[in-house]
């Protein structure tokens, strides 16, 4: 059998090893580029101009003050047409509809959730595709938002919270129907207060259905949401001490009313606290009794376990006011040092590095607790992260698939609208499931989970195809944005490298060598050919450490 | 016989082992669950009896697992009940991380990654994670990740591919996070391309299995890729396959029955497809935990503790139920709720690595473990 080392050597020789000029000459990363690539979906001409005009502090102030809604972005989304198609059906019993293949606006993104309830009515003969449509609209819009939202930092944070409070939008039609309001809620709260957001998540129909709390009734309660609330949303797995302690009273701090961590006994109690937290979708409660049809959170008193509870040493009396048990659990969790540490670590991991500076984490944790009631708690934490010296460290995190694609389009400047949302399955090939990640952990945010050879191959695919019509994300011609001075192939290559990296560098000797073309070759006049060469230049600039890492 | 191969199928989500291999006559079992969440002794839900292997309990296999029953009867499949993590965790992610890392003292990487690092197997494809992500068990190695061979090629047929290869080699030459990975994937992709890419049709030569795989099972495609990799003589030693969807908190049977049926039939197809190469292969089937003895009010089951593992392979002495059955009386349950763990899952993994994969010192892969072999291999 072929020896692995010999095999590698022969294969490497076959692909013509050469000296490493680009690496040796790799310029030190420009601090402005590092700054923008950490706080946006990728530097582009507009953000570079903003940063040059406002300075780092001014840019940050501007971003943190931008509202969730933006007229320019709203106009793009209003113009978005997303395909919907399905086959005709007729089961002979009135369960029948016509086939369909049409382009339709994103009509559910801003719809009143109550108006979407007919999609969940089983008497209503419609295709599953229609029922699940609202979730598809959010997914389709997400790439356009990431590329074009002027409030980039809010969008980056919205994606962060989607991973933190992960919901699989296509788990079933119920989650899908309520997903637009879930997405909007996270965007509204993305820079705000953690406790407020936590409360809104716990009342979100999509989350309540995704983690089965919507059907959780007294004894035995469904534990799914309760467990993830503790493990993923607040305290984190590091504070799950079940392998150390068998009884609640043994956990340090529990006897004094606030345990340092939690065990399964606490999970059971939290599950009891949230019984009855359900959804106003007209669901059956008991004989002659239905939940209201609001499309919003609904508390079902008859399903609640009203008796006394003890969560992490905190005693709760029996028969309290509606929702008081769940609210107190969230109050306690959102002011717990374990939550502060866990959430701040994830935040710094997202914006800076996989292993954030320990001193920074200490300061963030203290600030999280000090500002627990502030309406701009999260914005304040981001300010602290950006002000920290470690924020300027060289790029070390690989761009994950969604970020890679968004950054590519931002740098190229094309208009992104995916009428068939093809990017969704394209990204799945690289392990990224935009809004459809099945387990509640959300996507991993550490580079060692992503930096595989297969990812490199997928990025080659994306880089080569992203600007082709068939890829389905853009129909813009790249040639439209070329400056007049770009008259040769060599200059074209340099121009696009500058767009992607912020600095024009020569990345393409391999291109000229392999194709036999010359850098001095005049640029063709044909628009399509100029577009094609531009796409090639972008691919070469994208497949570099400078672009793959942020 | 070629170098031995280990295939690990992970049932993500916590498979309800009490509804796969079931103590059908146990009064506590019957009392804790409605009929639709149990294997029965008679009628439509009557399971296949597994003989008197363990504690004189009438263990039966779920009706959706008939092919597993055949493999068991043929002496190729062993079932190990009441296995799992000794540390009591009912968290998916904690349990998966602990199992896949198997590093109580903080050793780096996953257990399969550590095996690869000490064995240093040759060949272009020593390890393959079938799917789109690297499982934690393979951390620390540079295993290839792909659902099928076509995804291991660099822009086949594209006129720019040679130039991009050169660009990647130049750009990532010694990069700390992608240098070696890039060099290896470029070499592997070139080799696969030379072998399987058909320039005239611009397509990859499709894999032609020796048997039909069930088309309604998500496990078929991944196992076909494993079979193809084994038969292609690329030096495959380790393959991992994730088979998810077992987190059945509500309306369990809508998911559980098709999943189990898929596991059973796809595994049988894979096994027959291997033909004479069965001699080289062991398959481990595991999950992060079993599920609660008592079902919940949503027609499902919550997270539990012990589950069942399966080992398939002619080198193992199959056709037996192994492990120690703790029973389901209230006092025997862990925390009064769940099937107790009586066998450390690492004892199973270690025995397979030692007896099948030729590992001499299990301490390298499972630091701190004093292995207690279950007699899987004679």
Image (tube, grey):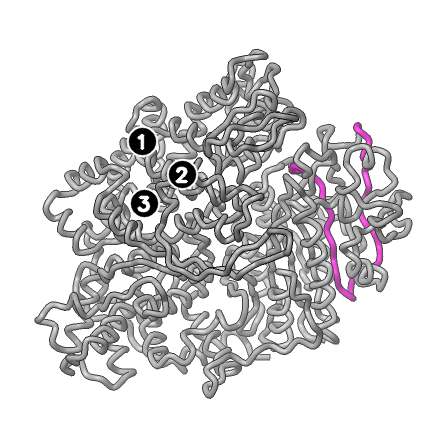
Label 3 or label 2, whichever lies nearer to me, is: 2
* Magenta span main SS: loop
Pointer 3 or 2: first along the chain: 3
Report the span colored magenta. Answer: B301-330
Q: Taking B283 as reference, is B40 left or right?
A: right
Query: Residue at label 3?
Result: A156
Assign the N terminus of chain B to one quadrant of the image: bottom right
Asked if the residue at tag 1 contacts the one at tag 2, i.e. Cβ–Cβ closer than 8 Å, the answer is no
Q: Residue at the location (45% across, 41% down)?
A: A116
Mark 1, chain letter? Answer: A
Label 2 or label 1, whichever lies nearer to me, is: 2
For the residue pair B256 and B237, the one nearer the viewer reads as B256
Pointer 2 or 1: first along the chain: 2
Assign the C terminus of chain B to one quadrant of the image: bottom right
For the residue pair A85 and A155, the one nearer the viewer reads as A85
Residue density around tag 3, few if under 14, some if 14–19, many if 20 or more, within 10 Å: many
Same-subunit check for callouts 2 and 1: yes
Q: Residue at the location (33% across, 41% down)?
A: A157
Task: Check residue A181 in the rendering and tell me which mark sits there, or answer none.
Answer: 2
Rendered location of residue A347, percent (x, y) = 36, 39
Give the Cα separation between the discs numbered 3 and 2: 18 Å
Image quadrant assignment for residue A58? top left
For the residue labelled by badge 3, is the local secondary structure a helix, a strand or a loop?
A: helix
Mark 2, chain letter? Answer: A
Give the Cα separation between the discs numbered 2 and 1: 17 Å
Residue A425 visible to the viewer: yes
**Vertical side of A14 occupied by B43: above or below:** above
Query: Residue at label 1?
Result: A192
Give the Cα separation between the discs numbered 1 and 3: 14 Å
**Vertical side of A46 occupied by B155: above or below:** below
Q: Taking B192 as reference, is B327 left or right?
A: right
């Amino acid at each position: 059998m072929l020896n692995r080392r010999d095999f590698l050597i022969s294969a490497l020789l076959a692909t013509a090893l050469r000296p490493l000029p680009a690496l040796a000459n790799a310029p030190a990363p420009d601090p402005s580029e590092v700054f923008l690539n950490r706080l946006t979906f990728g530097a582009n001409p507009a953000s570079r101009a903003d940063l040059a005009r406002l300075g780092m502090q001014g840019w940050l102030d501007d971003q943190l003050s931008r509202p969730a809604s933006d007229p320019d972005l709203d106009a793009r989304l209003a113009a978005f047409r997303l395909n919907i198609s399905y086959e005709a059906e007729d089961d002979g019993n009135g369960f029948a509809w016509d086939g369909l293949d049409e382009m339709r606006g994103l009509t559910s993104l801003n719809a009143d959730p109550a108006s979407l309830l007919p999609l969940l009515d089983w008497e209503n003969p419609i295709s599953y595709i229609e029922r699940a449509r609202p979730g598809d609209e959010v997914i389709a819009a997400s790439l356009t938002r990431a590329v074009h939202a002027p409030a980039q930092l809010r969008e980056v944070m919205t994606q962060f919270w989607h991973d933190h409070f992960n919901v699989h939008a296509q788990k079933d039609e119920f989650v899908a129907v309520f997903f637009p309001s879930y997405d909007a809620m996270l965007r509204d709260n993305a820079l705000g207060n953690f406790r407020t957001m936590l409360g809104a998540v716990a009342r979100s129909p999509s989350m309540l259905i995704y983690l089965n709390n919507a059907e959780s009734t007294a004894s035995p309660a469904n534990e799914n949401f309760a467990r993830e609330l503790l493990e993923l949303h607040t305290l984190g797995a590091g504070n799950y001490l079940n392998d150390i302690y068998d009884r609640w009273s043994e956990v340090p701090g529990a006897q004094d009313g606030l345990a340092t961590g939690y065990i399964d006994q606490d999970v059971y109690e939290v599950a009891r606290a949230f019984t009855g937290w359900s959804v106003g979708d007209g669901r059956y409660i008991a004989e002659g009794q239905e939940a209201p049809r609001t499309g919003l959170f609904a508390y079902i008193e008859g399903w609640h376990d009203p008796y006394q509870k003890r969560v992490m040493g905190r005693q709760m009396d029996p028969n309290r006011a509606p929702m008081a048990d769940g609210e107190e659990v969230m109050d306690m969790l959102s002011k717990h040092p374990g939550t502060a540490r866990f959430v701040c670590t994830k935040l710094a991991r997202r914006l800076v590095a996989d292993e954030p500076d320990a001193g920074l984490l200490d300061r963030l944790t203290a600030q999280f607790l000090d500002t627990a009631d502030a309406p701009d708690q999260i914005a304040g934490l981001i300010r602290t992260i950006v002000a920290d010296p470690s924020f300027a460290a060289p790029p070390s995190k690989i761009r994950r698939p969604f970020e890679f694609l968004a950054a590519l389009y931002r740098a190229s400047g094309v208009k992104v609208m995916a009428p068939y949302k093809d990017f969704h399955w394209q990204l799945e090939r690289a392990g990224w499931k935009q809004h459809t990640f099945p387990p509640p952990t959300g996507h991993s945010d550490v580079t060692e989970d992503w930096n595989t050879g297969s990812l490199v191959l997928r990025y080659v695919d994306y880089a080569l195809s992203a600007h082709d019509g068939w890829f389905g994300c853009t129909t813009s011609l790249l040639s439209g944005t070329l400056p007049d001075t770009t008259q040769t192939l060599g200059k074209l290559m340099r121009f696009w490298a500058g767009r992607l990296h912020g600095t024009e560098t020569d990345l393409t000797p391999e291109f000229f060598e392999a194709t036999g073309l010359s850098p001095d070759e005049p640029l063709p006049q044909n628009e399509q050919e100029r577009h094609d060469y531009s796409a090639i230049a972008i691919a070469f600039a994208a497949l570099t450490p400078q672009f793959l890492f942020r | 016989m070629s170098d031995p191969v280990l295939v690990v199928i992970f049932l993500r989500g916590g498979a309800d082992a009490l509804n796969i291999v079931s103590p059908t006559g146990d009064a506590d079992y019957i009392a804790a669950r409605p009929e639709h969440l149990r294997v029965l002794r008679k009628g439509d839900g009557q399971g296949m009896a597994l003989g008197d292997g363990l504690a004189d309990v009438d263990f039966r296999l779920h009706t959706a697992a008939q092919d597993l029953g055949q493999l068991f009867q043929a002496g190729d499949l062993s079932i190990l009940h009441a296995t799992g993590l000794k540390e009591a965790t009912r968290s998916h992610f904690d349990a998966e991380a602990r199992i896949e890392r198997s590093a109580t003292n903080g050793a780096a990487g996953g257990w399969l990654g550590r095996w690869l690092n000490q064995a240093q197997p040759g060949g272009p494809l020593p390890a393959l994670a079938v799917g789109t992500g690297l499982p934690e068990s393979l951390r620390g190695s540079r295993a290839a990740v792909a659902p099928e061979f076509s995804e291991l090629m660099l822009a086949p047929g594209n006129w720019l591919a040679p130039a991009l290869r050169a660009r990647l080699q130049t750009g990532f030459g010694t990069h700390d996070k992608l240098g070696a990975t890039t060099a290896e994937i470029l070499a592997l992709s070139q080799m696969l391309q030379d072998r399987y890419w058909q320039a005239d049709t611009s397509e990859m030569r499709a894999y032609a299995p020796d048997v039909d795989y069930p088309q309604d099972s998500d496990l078929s495609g991944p196992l076909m890729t494993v079979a193809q990799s084994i038969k292609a003589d690329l030096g495959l030693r380790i393959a991992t396959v994730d088979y998810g969807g077992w987190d059945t908190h509500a309306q369990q049977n809508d998911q559980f029955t098709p999943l189990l049926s898929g596991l059973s039939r796809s595994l049988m197809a894979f096994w027959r497809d291997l033909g004479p190469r069965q001699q080289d292969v062991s398959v481990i089937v595991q999950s992060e935990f079993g599920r609660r003895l008592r079902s919940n009010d949503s027609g499902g089951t919550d997270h539990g503790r012990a589950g069942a593992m399966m080992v398939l392979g002619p080198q193992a002495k199959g056709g037996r139920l192994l492990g120690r059955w703790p029973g389901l009386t209230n006092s025997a349950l862990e925390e009064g709720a769940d099937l107790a763990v009586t066998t450390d899952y690492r004892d199973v993994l270690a025995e397979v690595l030692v007896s099948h994969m030729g590992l001499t010192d299990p301490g390298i892969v499972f630091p701190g473990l004093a292995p207690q072999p279950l007699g899987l291999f004679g």
